[in-house]
Each structure stands twice: as C-alpha cells, then as structure tokens.
Image (tube, rainbow, N blue to C red):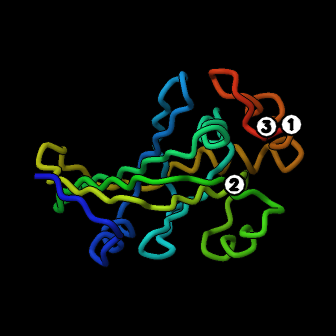
Amino acid sequence: MAKFFDTLLPEHTVFIARQKVFFVATQAPGGRINLSPKGLDSLRVLDDHTVAYLDLTGSGAETAAHLRVDPRLTLMLCGFGVEALILRLYGKGESVRPGDARWAQLVPLFPEYPGTRQFVVLHVESVQTSCGAGLPLMGYAGERGTLTEWAKKKGEDGIAEYRRARNARSIDGLPTGFGE
C-alpha cells in the first residue's frame, strides 16, 4: 500500500543515502516524457524538503530543457537489495549552473567529476513510498567509470564543444541553455 508524506522523514534520508542508482522524470508541455537513470555518488538530501543531484555532461540534456519550461520533476529510487522499497519524490526542480548564486553552496557537497554541467535541485512537495515487493533482488558490482573517463579525455574545451554540438537542444527541439 502506497503511503504519502509531506516531507522527507529520517528513514527516507537513510534509504536515499544507500542507493547507487536513481531515476529522474520530466516533461515539457506537449513533449516526450523523459526518464533517465543516474548513478555515481551524485545525490544529496539538503533538508527535509530539498534534494539535489549533480548532473554530468552526457548524450542528452532533456531535464535541463524541460525545467526551463515546466519545473515539474520526479525522482524515483528503488531498493534492489534486501530492503524492498520504492521511494518517489515529487516537486519542482531548478537548474543551478556555474555562476549562479547557489553553485558555490552545492559544490562542496559532492565529489568532483569531470564534465559537471549543473546541479538539479528538487523542492520536494510530496513523498511517496510503496512496498517494492515486485522488484528483483540485485547486488551492486561497482561503478563503470566510462562517463568520467570520456569527460577526462575530452577536457574542458572538448566538453564545451560537445555541449554546443550535442546538448544545446532537447530531442523535441527545446533549448537547454547549454552551448549558448
């Protein structure tokens, strides 16, 4: 049975800290729903109504484009280990980029990864838990390293060019604010 909460409880925060993967969902009006998996050590609970994740340069920039026109954002975490649980965080998202006032506050909370392009902050309006009894039992084998190695090889100039060429627009043609 699903349960709803107005705020993140301490047990939710502990659960979030143990997860190795989470999923981000956004949609621009009339556009495709984007659902993206995220990994690495990139998610933090800031307080009982706010979480943030570090967003790295990758093949797309859908979340960035969607948040510019519609701030609705959902994060989902699944307990694939012994603890079966699905945790969804619903709210409004905002993009924090280099040069923004909050950037300096968020940087020390996360590891330094090459290719960092923004933080996405979720202002949590509702928390939902459900049992997760249908989830498979899976173990963690480690990080791939592929994305961070790719970004290291590209270097700052190469990443900037990649963003201009490949991250400037969403798959639906919306501007992302990258590469401008």
Q: Is residue 86 above or below residue 57?
A: below
Find disc 3 in the rendering and name its residue: 163
Q: Is residue 54 above or below residue 144?
A: below
Image position, residue 35 (x, y; %): 45, 36
Q: Is residue 10 above or below residue 95?
A: below
- Residue located 78% across and 69% down the image: 101
Badge 3 vs badge 1, beta-carbon distance below 8 Å: yes
Which of labels 2 and 3 is toward the front? 2
Image position, residue 3 (x, y; %): 18, 58
Which disc number belongs to residue 161?
1
Q: Is residue 178 left or right of residue 122?
A: right
- Give SS at disc 1: helix
Based on the displayed image, in which of its 4 quarters is residue 17 positioned?
Answer: bottom left
- Give SS at disc 2: strand
Tell me the CA gap for discs 3 and 1. 5 Å
Badge 2 vs badge 3, beta-carbon distance below 8 Å: no
Q: Is residue 94 left or right of residue 100?
A: left
Crowd band around label 1 with a 10 angstrom C-alpha radius: few (<14), some (14–19), many (20+): some
Q: Is residue 116 left or right of residue 157?
A: left
Q: Which tag, 2 or 3, sits closer to the chain's start?
A: 2
Query: In front here: 15 or 65?
Result: 65
Query: In front here: 29 or 167?
Result: 29
- Residue located 81% across and 28% down the image: 165
- Residue located 61% across and 43% down the image: 67
Q: Which tag, 1 or 2, sits closer to the chain's start?
A: 2
Tag 1: residue type?
Glu
Tell me the CA gap for discs 2 and 3. 12 Å
Crowd band around label 3 with a 10 angstrom C-alpha radius: few (<14), some (14–19), many (20+): many
Find disc 2 in the rendering and name its residue: 118
Q: Is residue 97 above or below residue 165?
A: below
